[in-house]
Each structure stands twice: as C-alpha cells, then as structure tokens.
C-alpha cells in the first residue's frame, strides 16, 4: 500500500476527484481518499511518481508518507456518530470524529455552546472582572447585562457557528434528542440512525429540598447573570466556588453579602490552610460567612427573604442558591439503550468513557468526574476517538488544574496532603506565605502556596496556591505534577524576577533552606 499526503482538498467532492485520478493510473487496484485527513491509501503496483503526477494533473499536490494517522471508514447511510448535547464536550467529540472522517449529527435543544459559554465560566468571569475594575456602587447593572449578552453572542458565533462552517461533516440540529433503541434516536420529530453515540448533555444547578424555597423567588447560576437590579443584601446558600466567586463580585459591585455554608468551612475541597486564609480575606473585605449552618426553611416577608436554620436566622433582599450541580440525564432514553446511571443520576463510564452499552459513550458534566469545561472537552475528544477506532485512549485526571476565581484566586493541581497520605505516600510539605515573595510585597498582595512532595524522592505530588493570578500561576506547577518532576528539577529552573510565579520555586527552596535568609534570586 502507498500512502499519500494530499494537499489542496477543501470538500468531499475534492476527495472524489482525487480518488478518480488515482484509480486511472495503471496498476492501481483501489484507492481510498479521506478528505478531513488529507490522506490517500492506494492498493496495487503502480509507481509512486505516477500516482503523484495523476494527483497533480487533477489540480492537487501529493507526497508519499510512511506513516498515516488512523482513519475511520464511514458506515454508509447512517450517522457514524450521534452526539446528544451541543456544549464543549459535544463539540470536541464532533470535531475529533470529523477529523477521523466520520459523519456526525449533534442534537442540542438549548442554546449552542453549553453551560460554560452561556451560564458559567464566561459570564461569571466577565462579572468578576467588571466588579474588580469598578468603583463600588457605581455600576449600571442593566448595562452590564446588555454588554454580557453582546459578548456571548460574539463568542457563540466565533467558537461554535463559525466552527460548524469549517466542518461540513458535522450536522447540527437545534432540537431535543432521545434514544429510541440501539442505533436509533429521535431528534425533534424525526428519527436518525447512528453507528455509535456520545452523550454530552451537561448539568444544571442543584436546588436543595429546603422547606418553602420553591415558593419564593431565587436565583441560580443559570439566571443570576440576567439580574435587572443590584441586590441590596444578597444571601448566598453555598460556600463553594460559585457562591464565593459571585458573592465577592456582588460585594464589590455594592451589595451586602452573606454566605451560608452547611459544611464546617468554605471551599471544603481545598487545602485547609488556603481556605482559612481565603475566608479571612473575604471577611475582612466585608463578606459575612456563616459555616456549619444548614438552611432548613425559607420564606418571604414583604420585600425580605428570610432563611432559618437550627441556630440562626438571616434576612436579605435577594437569594442566590449555589449548592452544586446535577446531571441532565432524565428524559433522553438512556433506559431504552441500557445505559446505567448512579444514584445521583450521573452516567457510569469506564476508563475509556464507554457506558454500559458498548456502542454509547459519555463525556462532560453528565459523567461528573471533574466538572470543568477543559475536562469536558478532553473527555469528549477521547470518547469520540474510542467510539470510532476502538478503546485505546484514557483520560489522565491526575494533573488537571482547577481554580476558584475569587480575589485572590485559589488554584490547585495534583494531590492534597491528606489525599497523598491516604494513598500511602510518606509526604513532606511546605507552606510559604506571600510575604516572602518579592513581587507580592511590592504589590501589597497576600497569598499562600503549599507544596506536597514524596519525602524519599522529592517528587512533587501537588501544588496549591492562593494568590493574585493564582489561576495563571498554577500552570507553572502542572508540568511538575504531570511529568513527575522533583524539587531538584524545580530548583534548576530560572524564573523571571520579580513575578508571582516565582513563588513556586521559593516554596521548593523552603524544603532545603530558610528562604528568609536568601538574597534576591539566590539559588
């Protein structure tokens, strides 16, 4: 077999033209041309130079290659991949499938782009930045919402609609979808046949069963970005990432803010030193935080929202419920195709993102492993590739970073101290205050960095940062965890001075030396 890289093809018609040109060469038994990959595979005993010349005469360029990417052979008149959900996981799956040569159908009943673009990462960070850069109480919230909508409209076009135009193998339908049986789905009012499928239906805000809550008006992360007024006193149920990020944003916009968290501390998934420091900073800024407080009842008294618990009562003008997320896995026919979910409704998958039905895969929030847009996209691409080419790729979650976008930002990668101990590691740990980081000192900024290492080898197991631009700094630590680097490797690196990211090296130095006794940039 001769493998050729074909240049200049822009559509399936081009591929057909190249195929006919190759098959016209004496000695060719058969030719397969894959437009998305720019690849041709030719069987027979024809001379390579004659094949290249035939392609050139057809109006394209060709060159011989020894290795070629694996491709997917379409399955006739059915969709090669049916994707239920049009967010980041769904589009990542569709693009990967199209790159492999597959014909793809996406069904999405809501707004294109999913949670991150429309109701999550993008609008929340926009609001956070508006609050950070505005004078308290001076913002026209209606104008903020109007500009937010313009931004989202622009991003939907650039990141989704324009992408569809670049991938003719992907068909997008703005209709609901559900499985009918193996290989068959209902999309809108029409039936569609498919070879394999990926479920990427995402998640929605979880609303706890609080007595009286459903009888009063409240906001979630789905609709809080459409407020037509600035709350005078915002009550926030939930002290996780969403509650803290939005709580601080509204605090800076001019609202009084009270956060109520049922667990013993805010940000309970993070290292204790960092979450305690974050609480200290937020409370100093003016946020009221009540922890270990489970809201049992909610009611409205004229223009006031009242929340009651066992030992507390708080009153405010507006209510934000930020108590986690639940998967969108109901009413999509999973039971019709034998796809199992766990008790919380998340789809069960194996290490290849394959469900209990071997022809159906799942990715993103509906799986619930790490509910991050970056992970959703990675899982989607892996799921599509495994569905079409067979199970070969796994998702490595061990070095995926995450962040809480408060100010300062709390970011983390790798194992926490207790997690490492539970896994049997003998650990050595250092926590460095940002009063030892020159850039933080001259910028009058606070922060902490904690590094967890394997005691015997010095291997970096985890890095956790509370700092200005912490979500950026954490990328300095990702390769340390991903590639199993050691403290010595970190100490061999040279940083720009003075920077906040220098904190990673300074923390590494603190394992070996007293950093208060080091001059600037000392090794």
Image (spheres, rainbow, N blue to C red):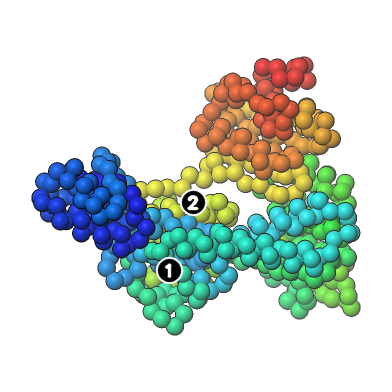
Rendering coords of residue 348 (x, y %): 46, 60
Per the rendering, the mark at residue 171 is 1
Residue at the spot x=67%, y=17% of the render? 523
Residue at the spot x=60%, y=35% of the render? 477
Residue 139 is drawn in which quadrant? bottom right
Nearest-to-viewer mark from 2 and 1: 1
**Where 329 sits versus 501, above or below?**
below
The crowd level at tag 2 (other Cα within 10 Å; few <14, some 14-19, many 20+) is some
The crowd level at tag 1 (other Cα within 10 Å; few <14, some 14-19, many 20+) is some
Question: Which residue ends up furthest to the bottom in the rendered image?
Answer: 189
Residue 258 can be seen, yes or no:
no
Q: Secondary structure at mark 2?
A: helix
Per the rendering, the mark at residue 341 is none
Q: Secondary structure at mark 1?
A: strand
Residue at the spot x=38%, y=79% of the render? 191
- Horizontal placement of 10 versus 278: left or right? left
Q: Which residue does the numbered mark 2 point to in the structure image?
A: 378
Residue 522 is drawn in which quadrant? top right
- Label 2 vs label 1: CA separation? 21 Å
């Amino acid at each position: 077999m001769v493998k050729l890289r074909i240049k200049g093809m822009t559509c399936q018609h081009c591929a057909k033209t190249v195929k006919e040109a190759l098959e016209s060469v004496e000695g060719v038994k058969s030719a397969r041309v894959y437009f998305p990959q720019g690849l041709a595979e030719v069987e027979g005993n024809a001379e390579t130079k004659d094949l290249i010349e035939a392609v050139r005469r057809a109006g394209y360029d060709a060159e011989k290659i020894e290795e070629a990417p694996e491709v997917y052979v379409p399955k006739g008149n059915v969709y090669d991949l049916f994707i239920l959900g049009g967010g980041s996981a769904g589009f990542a799956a569709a693009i990967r499938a199209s790159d492999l040569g597959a014909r793809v159908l996406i069904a999405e009943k809501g707004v294109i782009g999913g949670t991150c673009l429309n109701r999550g990462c993008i609008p929340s960070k926009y609001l956070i930045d508006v609050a950070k850069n505005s004078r308290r109480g001076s913002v026209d919230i209606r104008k903020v919402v109007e500009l937010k909508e313009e931004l989202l409209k622009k991003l939907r076009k650039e990141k989704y609609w324009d992408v569809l135009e670049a991938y003719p193998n992907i068909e997008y339908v703005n209709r609901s979808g559900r499985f009918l049986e193996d290989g068959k789905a209902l999309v809108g009012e029409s039936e569609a046949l498919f070879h394999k499928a990926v479920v990427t239906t995402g998640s929605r805000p979880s609303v706890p069963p609080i007595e009286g809550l459903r009888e009063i008006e409240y906001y979630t992360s789905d609709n809080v970005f459409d407020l037509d007024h600035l709350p005078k006193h915002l009550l926030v149920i939930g002290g996780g990432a969403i509650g803290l990020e939005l709580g601080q944003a509204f605090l800076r916009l001019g609202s009084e803010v009270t956060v109520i968290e049922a667990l013993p501390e805010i940000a309970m998934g993070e290292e204790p030193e960092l979450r305690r420091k974050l609480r200290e900073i937020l409370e100093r800024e003016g946020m009221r935080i009540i922890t270990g407080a489970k809201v049992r009842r909610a009611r409205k008294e004229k223009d006031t929202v009242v929340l009651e618990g066992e030992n507390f009562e708080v009153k405010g003008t507006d209510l934000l419920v930020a108590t986690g997320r639940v998967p969108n896995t109901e009413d999509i026919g999973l039971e019709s195709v034998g796809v199992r979910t766990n008790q919380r409704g998340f789809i069960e998958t194996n290490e290849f993102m394959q469900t209990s039905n071997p022809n159906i895969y799942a990715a993103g929030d509906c799986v619930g492993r790490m509910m991050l847009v970056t992970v959703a996209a990675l899982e989607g691409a892996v799921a599509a590739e495994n569905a079409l080419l067979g199970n070969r790729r796994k998702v490595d979650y061990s070095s995926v970073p995450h962040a809480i976008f408060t100010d300062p930002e709390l970011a983390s990668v790798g194992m926490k101290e207790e997690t490492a101990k539970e896994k049997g590691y003998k650990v050595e740990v250092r926590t460095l205050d940002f009063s030892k980081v020159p850039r933080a000192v001259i910028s009058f900024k606070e922060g902490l960095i904690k590094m967890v290492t394997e005691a015997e080898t010095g291997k970096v197991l985890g890095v956790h940062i509370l700092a200005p631009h912490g979500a950026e700094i954490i990328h300095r630590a990702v390769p340390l965890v991903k590639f199993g680097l050691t403290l010595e490797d970190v100490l061999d690196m040279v940083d720009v001075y003075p920077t906040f990211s220098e904190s990673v090296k300074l923390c590494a130095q603190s394992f070996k030396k007293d950093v208060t006794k080091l001059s600037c940039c000392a090794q």
